[in-house]
Image: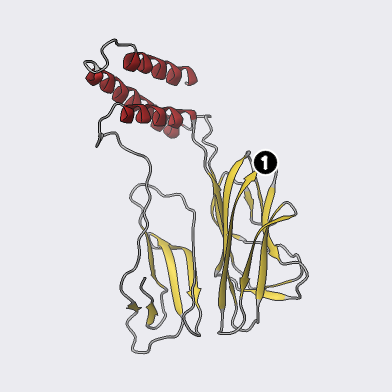
């Protein structure tokens, strides 16, 4: 299969650059590019359907802490409920993420201090070295904290979340605390598709009909909105990310002035799956701030 994609790419380059009159033959060149891209995309889909041994080396995990835990100094936080574990690199029994490949990885942790605790200090470490830290402040009921990191890992490096060294016992809230990370590397086929698509764009045609496999969005809430239908308005805010009808993350903004909350998730979606943010079920009316 590697020979297949190399041969397609080589013959396409000859068609694009081997003609003496490139302008006159640009239509033929683009047709060849489109044919090669379509062939590679069909081949890639077929490999996915037949379980080909060609590795995508995709790695991603998303895990939730279920119980409340009183942490001692340096104690690892074991996020024990797996939501996503592509590549099986996260161990829900130890709380360790072990890098299966060299590469650049992104990690995030959102967490909550319960209302009956005073403060919470957490740390993200690579092997034994700190790569990020987070803090949930005292006062105002439950308080949220967050931390993230982008690091280069070698195969076998371990990343985990732990209680900050030197602090006495502190409590982390179960159910509202998540640990997430991912690495994504492309297959040889996808790299070949990208190469051909870039070549096609260089030929000068704008608004190409070649489909893109990249999807991204970023949106802002412009009005302040009161969520829920009960008559009493709460002082806190509880939100939830759902995939179809299943929760994949939740977040909480505590009472006491304007307070922030956060949530995130890394998940595998099938075509047609729907992800949205909604008010947490069973809560009274709560207001989310605009801007």
79 vs 127, left or right, is left
Q: Residue at x 37, y 83 (%)?
A: 285
Which of the pair 21/271 is nearer the observer?
21
Which of the pair 107/131 is nearer the observer?
131
Q: Eyeballing the image, is 7 above or below 188? A: above
Residue position marked by numbered label 1 in the rendering: 154
Residue 145: horizontal and vertical position, in percent?
Answer: 57, 70
Q: Residue at x 76, y 71 (%)?
A: 72
Q: Residue at x 21, y 15 (%)?
A: 24
Quadrant in which the C terminus appears: bottom left
Q: Eyeballing the image, is 62 above or below 144? A: above
Q: Residue at x 25, y 35 (%)?
A: 206
User: Quick check: can you spot residue 46?
Assistant: no
User: Quick check: can you spot residue 164?
Assistant: yes
Residue 154: horizontal and vertical position, in percent?
Answer: 67, 41
Residue 65: horizontal and vertical position, in percent?
Answer: 60, 65
Q: Eyeballing the image, is 122 above or below 196? A: below
Q: Eyeballing the image, is 94 above or below 239? A: above
Residue extending farthest to the bottom is 232
161 vs 235, left or right, is right
Q: Residues within 10 Å of mark 1 (few under 14, many from 20)?
A: some
Which of the pair 110/232 is nearer the observer?
110
């Amino acid at each position: 299969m590697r020979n297949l994609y190399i041969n397609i790419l080589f013959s396409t380059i000859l068609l694009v650059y081997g003609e003496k009159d490139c302008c006159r033959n640009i239509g033929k060149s683009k047709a060849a590019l489109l044919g090669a891209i379509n062939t590679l995309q069909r081949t890639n889909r077929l490999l996915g359907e037949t379980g080909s041994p060609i590795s995508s080396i995709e790695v991603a995990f998303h895990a939730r802490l279920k119980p409340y835990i009183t942490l001692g100094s340096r104690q690892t936080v074991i996020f024990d409920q797996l939501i996503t574990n592509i590549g099986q690199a996260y161990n829900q029994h130890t709380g360790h993420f072990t890098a299966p490949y060299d590469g650049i990885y992104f990690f995030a942790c959102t967490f909550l201090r319960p209302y009956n605790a005073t403060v919470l200090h957490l740390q993200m470490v690579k092997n034994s070295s700190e790569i990020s830290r987070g803090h949930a402040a005292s006062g105002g009921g439950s308080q949220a904290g967050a931390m993230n990191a982008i690091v280069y890992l070698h195969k076998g490096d371990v990343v985990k979340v732990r209680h900050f060294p030197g602090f006495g016992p502190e409590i982390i809230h179960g159910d509202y605390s998540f640990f997430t990370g991912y690495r994504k590397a492309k297959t040889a086929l996808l790299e070949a598709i990208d190469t051909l698509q870039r070549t096609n764009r260089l030929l000068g045609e704008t608004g190409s009909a070649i489909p893109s496999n990249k999807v991204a969005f970023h949106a802002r809430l412009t009005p302040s909105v009161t969520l829920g239908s009960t008559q009493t308005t709460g002082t806190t805010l509880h939100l939830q990310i759902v995939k179809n009808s299943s929760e994949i993350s939740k977040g909480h903004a505590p009472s006491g002035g304007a307070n922030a909350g956060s949530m995130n998730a890394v998940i595998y979606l099938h075509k047609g799956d729907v992800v949205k943010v909604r008010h947490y079920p069973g809560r009274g009316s709560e207001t989310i701030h605009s801007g």
